[in-house]
Image (cartoon, rainbow, N blue to C red):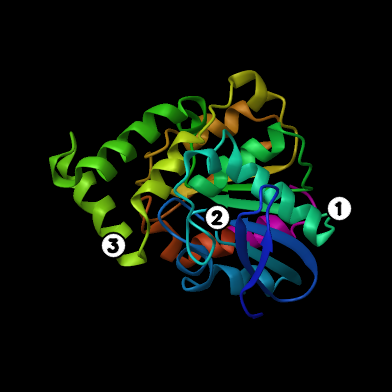
Amino acid sequence: MTEQQRFKSFDGVEIAWRTLGQGRPTLMLHGFLANAEFNWFAPGIAAAVAATGRQVIAPDLRGHGHSAAPIDPAAWPSDVLAADQEALIAHLGLTDYDLVGYSLGARTAVRMVTRGARPARLALGGMGDSGLLAAGARAAMFEDSIRHGEAARDPRAGRRVQAMMAASGLVPAAMLGVLTSFVATSEAQLRAIAIPTLVIAGQDDDDNGSAEGLAAMLTNARAVRTTGDHLSAVMDPALAAGLSAFLSAQTP
């Protein structure tokens, strides 16, 4: 595994990333309030994917991990996370690659595709139909939890979000910035995605709607369920195995 590397994105904000393995470039985007270490490296998913003959490229999304966490609202325009990854792809000179995302990373991956990114394969973890079609509703829950903690409309969610931010040393203003950058994806945009796609989620994970419903909207997709809920599914070796099998298969 390489050391943390950094580059300046389209607007000068520093984005950090790490790589693992050699071979086909595979860009892997983590979830909200997490980072590449938590979602990909610690659970062994990055190692499993790299073992199939791939180079995992795992950035920390803006505001997360080792990347910069600006608090100026101007640093959080619509689709900024997608724009950062487009800038990373350009910085690395990638023209033929695969794209994997979990939760916020899956939402970001879909936004990249709607903006013109063309990975050969697309894997969306922890994501369902409503998480893309109604991104604002999910953002509103997180905003309430970040601003009000235990006094949020859903106290349990408020406590969990506050604990996750504290554990990772996340900046609340930056996390609110992430939420303001959310853009919903229309059903027409989803139906236009013809890239071979895997939609994979825990059996008890409907936090972002139905994985099966999302797969049905995409032109060339299938849904797979593993064990666990939205937070625990990444720890199930079946998720790593499912991603690896999909990425390494000759046909989707």
Q: Earlier in the sequence, mark 3 or mark 1?
A: 1
Q: Is residue 156 magenta?
A: no
Name the residue type under label 1. Thr
Q: Earlier in the sequence, mark 3 or mark 2?
A: 2
Helix, strand, or loop for circle 3?
helix
In the rendered view, would you say 222 is above or below 45?
A: above
**Which residue is drawn at the image coordinates 66% and 24% (left, top)?**
189
Is residue 125 in view from this perspective?
no
- The residue identified by callout 3 is 166
Of residues 34 and 87, the one drawn nearer to the viewer in this rendering: 87
Q: CA distance from mark 3 to mark 1?
A: 38 Å
Query: Where residue 67 sits: x, y (%)?
Result: 54, 62
- The residue identified by callout 2 is 61
Q: Which residues are magenta?
A: 243-252
Are there few (<14), some (14-19), or many (20+) residues within 10 Å of tag 2? Answer: many
State which mark lies toward you, 2 or 1.
2
**Which residue is drawn at the image coordinates 53% and 39% (left, top)?**
74
Q: Quadrant of residue 38?
A: bottom left
Q: CA distance from mark 2 to mark 1?
A: 21 Å
Of residues 11 and 103, the one drawn nearer to the viewer in this rendering: 11
Name the residue type under label 3. Ala
| Image side of residue 11 versus residue 127, left or right | right
